[in-house]
Image (cartoon, coloured by chain):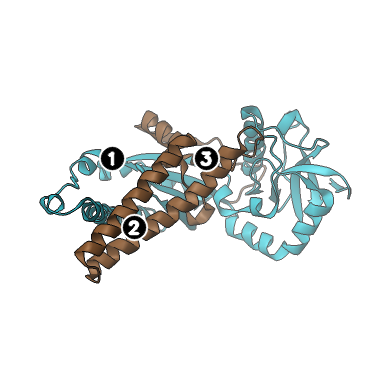
Chain colours: A cyan, B brown
Amino acid sequence: MKSVVFDKKFYPYCLVGQTVGLSELLRGVDGREVLQREVGTLTAVLSEWDDKKVELTRENVLRHDAVVRQVLEEATPLPFRFGHLVTAHQLESYVESKSETLQSKLQHLHNCVEMSVKIIWNREAELASQTPETEAMQKVGRGAAFLMSKQAEFQAEQSSSSEVAAIASWLKSRTSGLVRDELVVLRPAEKLVVSASFLVERSSLAAYKNRTALFDEERSDLHFLTSGPWPPYSFSNNELEFKTHLGVS
Amino acid sequence: MELSPENPLSAEPEIDTSHAQEFVEELRRVGDTLPSRINIDPDSVEQGLAKLVLTLIEFIRRLLEKQAVKRMEGGDLSPEQIEELGLALMKLEEKLHDLKTQFGLSEEDLNLDLGPIGRLI
């Protein structure tokens, strides 16, 4: 394994605590060779890059994902999202200045994968039955009726938020004890009301899957999409540190 | 169980749902997989900027509506004031609707993904 040459540009896939065995046949974004380089106390998985930008194509996105997934087979990576370009100096300086945070993130993610649960809650019938036009509205002017309809709308939104929060609490209670960390996004105004990411230890993966397999039976009022294992993108946030260089407007 | 070259994890992700089509449609709609970006293509910069500006106006408009409803519920407005405020907000909503149509934007377009915090509206 070589140390990084200072003025070169790289396309980074992920950071990892140790070197991993990558297939020689593995090709990265734009069909480039995938390398492992020491950067401070970590190992960066990257490709050398000589262009100004990265083309955002389906194939390139899949190649980025394939590299990170191959690393995941052996170790838990801190993945970068698609589209970053860095110089060796930027990468060195990033790892050096964030060394403690990155080590602590790696520790937090150690031996874990990301599992996802998305929930659709169909409320079309319920929403259709909410008739904003009431008798009181017919007795007042257009302006007052407008405000009254807004009042009814806000009350419905508030009630919807509480119900979606209750769904999220149920989900958290059902995965409790099987996950190390969780990120749950609520969208009460959408059909897709909950998007949750769970950080699951590899040793708990089978138990986690057995638990989520029961969701359809337990909550027939909801539609579930469960997926994973994924690299822990939601729990690493490496993309916040670098600008992306996507070849798109 | 530790990961190692001798003990690798099968990292091929599984996706399980009985409602695949519904999720595909919904995920496409909310743009869940990629954060929304302002389009700075020279040919459509106007629409990209309009989207950003109108999103902020929409956000403020909704705040004004909530404030007005609170004041109405608090009983500190006369019936005439409620009528005037309601008409003003109604016209603002209509005007914004016209501007959206002018720039070819839908209601779903007027939002910003704030990452871990969620969406602006």
Q: Where does the N terminus of chain A fall, quadrant-wise? A: top right
Identified by mark 2, the residue type is Glu
- Both on one chain, marks 2 and 3? yes
Spatial CA distance of label 1 from label 2 is 27 Å
Tag 1: residue type? Asn
The chain under label 3 reads B
Is label 3 in a helix, a strand or a loop?
A: loop
Residue A199 is labelled as none
Measured as percent of width and height from the top left, residue A42 is found at 75, 55
- Nearest to the eye among marks 1 and 2: give it: 2
Q: Give the residue drawn at x 59%, y 39%.
A: B46
Where is residue A82? Give x, y as percent. Answer: 65, 41
The chain that hosts pointer 1 is A
Q: Residues within 10 Å of mark 3 (few under 14, many from 20)?
A: few
Residue A174 placement, left or right of A61: left
Classed neighbour count for the residue bearing mark 2: other residues with Cα under 10 Å, few (<14), some (14–19), many (≥20): many
- Which residue is painted at 70% across and 65% down in the image? A100
Which amino acid type corresponds to the residue marked 3 in the rendered image? Answer: Thr
| Secondary structure found at label 2 | helix
Q: Which residue is mark 3?
A: B33
Number of the front mark, 2 or 3: 2
Whether residue B84 appears in this view of the structure is: yes
Tell me: residue A46, above or below residue A57: below
Decide if residue B120 is in sight here: no
Residue holding disc 1: A122
In the rendered image, residue A154, in percent from the top left (x then y), is placed at 28, 55
Residue at image x 12%, y 54%?
A136
Foreground: A130 or B86? B86
The local secondary structure at tag 1 comes to: loop
Q: Is residue A101 above or below residue A63?
A: below
Marked residue nearer the N-terminal end (2 or 3)? 3
Residue under pointer 2? B65
